[in-house]
Each structure stands twice: as structure tokens, then as C-alpha cells.
Image (cartoon, rainbow, N blue to C red):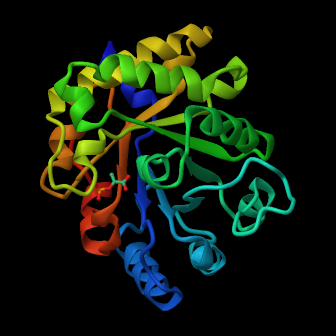
Amino acid sequence: MAQVQKRNRVPLLAGNWKMFKTISEATALVQALKAGCAGISNREILVCPPFAALSTVRDLVRGTNIRLGAQNMHWQLEGAFTGEISPVMVKDAGCQYVIIGHSERRQYFGETDETVNRKTKAAFGQTLIPIVCVGETLAEREAGQQLQVVEEQVRGGLAGLKPAEAEKLVIAYEPVWAIGTGKTATPEQAQEMHQWIRKLLSEFGNGAEQKIKILYGGSIKPDNIDMIMQQPDIDGGLVGGASLKAEDFSRIIKFIG
Ligand code: PEP
């Protein structure tokens, strides 16, 4: 049953380029990725370049199977917020998706569940699909608190969403201890958390939890993606380091499982 339901959710493979790639480097990466994943139609492919490269990448992916996303945004539509970018601007730059509450934003830039919630609502206000990131630290996992921590992030980040919005959401479970460290959650650890998140999402009602994609993120590589994607509640990946190489990301997109 779970496998049948999983197939109804088209896998999403999203590349988070973080603060990497100048415009010329971004151009080279996207050109290579276009060649590497041409003709793939049974997977959704997304790249999230830094803001400065968004419009260049938008022009390069137009008419292809690659979608565009931003890595962050403010929740206000405009205003005196030096250094920020608004949901309207993200939409105008050609994005369909926006990553919200990545652990690096939580850790280094004071992102909280409350700001995640504001940004998530603002994304829906512009018909952007938010990819809401959650995940526990190593200390929290070692203390056995991971389910509780992620529950708080899910409840706080998604508070007040309408069921019709909720079903369009994407959640990324990214254990902080697995991001950029080379350590991956075991498929069983990831599956346990994804199942837990899906149970929490069922509170939106109307079967929303069966429509919401839950991605895994944390040191995904070509040699572990197949095993990860075999888990029934894992609907794709949010990929950092390995999305910076077209060959690696193309292989991840072509996972077998
Ligand atoms: C990320 O940036 O969301 C991420 C999971 O990074 P990495 O794949 O490098 O661990």
C-alpha cells in the first residue's frame, strides 16, 4: 500500500547550491546538468542557486525539465529591509520553489519556527512552493529527543496553514549532524522520522499527508541515493554538496529504487 501511495508522489530531487557558484560557474553547471538529465520526465528536478545567479539560471532552464528555486526570502512583500529579498522578487525571478528554514539559516542567521511560519505563509501568498526544512542536532539525537524536536519544528513552522495550502507543501528532513559532514542517517533512521512527520501532517485532514512530499537531506551522494529512495516515506532529496557537480547530481536524479 505504501509503495502505491509513494508512486503517486513524483520524486523531487532538489539541489541547494548554498553560497557557491558565480554566474559563469552557474551557467556551466546548468548546461552540463541539462545534458545529464535531458528527457527525464518521471522525476521533478530543481536547482536553487544563489540569488545573484537566479535570473541567469532561469533563462537557461526555460523550456526544460529543470525548475528554479530560491534558498531563502523575507516574509514582507517589500520595505526597508536592507540585504533582504522579498517573496514577490523571488517569484519575479522565475522561482517556483523556495527553501525555508534551512538549518544553516537557523544556526547562523537566527531563523526560528516563527520566522519559518511567516515565510511559509508568505510563499503561499505568491504561489511559491515552500520547502520547509526541519531536523535535529547531534546532541538532540543523542539525548533521544529527535522526534520531539522535529514535532515542535513542524507544528511551529506550519501553524495556521490552510489544508488546501498544506497539501502543496514540501518538507525536507535534514538531520543537522548529517549536513555537509559525510555522515548520512541510515535509511531506517530517515524512514522512522519521515513516517513520524507524515503522521503529524495527517492532522491537516483530507489526506493531505499523502500528497505532501517529504525529502531527505544530509550528505546524499550517488552511492547512497538508491538505498535512501527505497524507503516508502522518502519522496526525494535535498542535496547540497553533490548538487554542485553535474555528473553527481544527474546520477542522484536517476536513482534506482
Ligand atoms: C543541504 O544543503 O541541504 C544539504 C543536505 O547539504 P549536503 O548534501 O552537502 O549535506
| Residue at 84% from the left image edge and 53% from the top image edge | 77
Q: Quadrant of residue 96?
A: bottom right
Whether residue 4 is visible to the viewer of this picture, yes or no, is no
Q: Give the residue displayed 56% in from the left and 38% down from the top.
A: 112
> Is 41 drawn above or below residue 161 in the view shown?
below
Q: Nearer the viewer, residue 238 or 113?
A: 113
The answer to which quarter of the image holds residue 80 is bottom right
- Residue 144 vs residue 241: left or right? left
Q: Position of residue 26 (x, y in %)?
A: 47, 81
Q: Nearer the viewer, residue 227 or 84?
A: 84
Can you say whether 148 is above or below 125 in the image?
Answer: above
Residue at image position (59%, 60%) is 70
Q: Position of residue 164 (x, y in %)?
A: 71, 22
Residue 106 x/y as whole percent: 48, 46
The quadrant of the picture occupied by the N terminus is top left
Residue 189 visible: yes
In percent of width and height, residue 252 lies at: 27, 57
Task: Give the vertical position of 153 relative to 120 (above or below).
Answer: above
The structure residue drawn at horizontal position 25% and vertical position 20%, both measured from the top left corner, is 192
Q: How many numbered badges does the structure rendering display?
A: 0
Relative to 215, is 207 on the left or the right? right
Extreme-right residue of the structure:
79
Query: Toward the viewer: 75 or 9?
Result: 75
* Up/down of 205 relative to 137, above or below: above
Q: Which quadrant contains ligand 1?
A: bottom left
| Quadrant position of the C terminus in the picture | top left
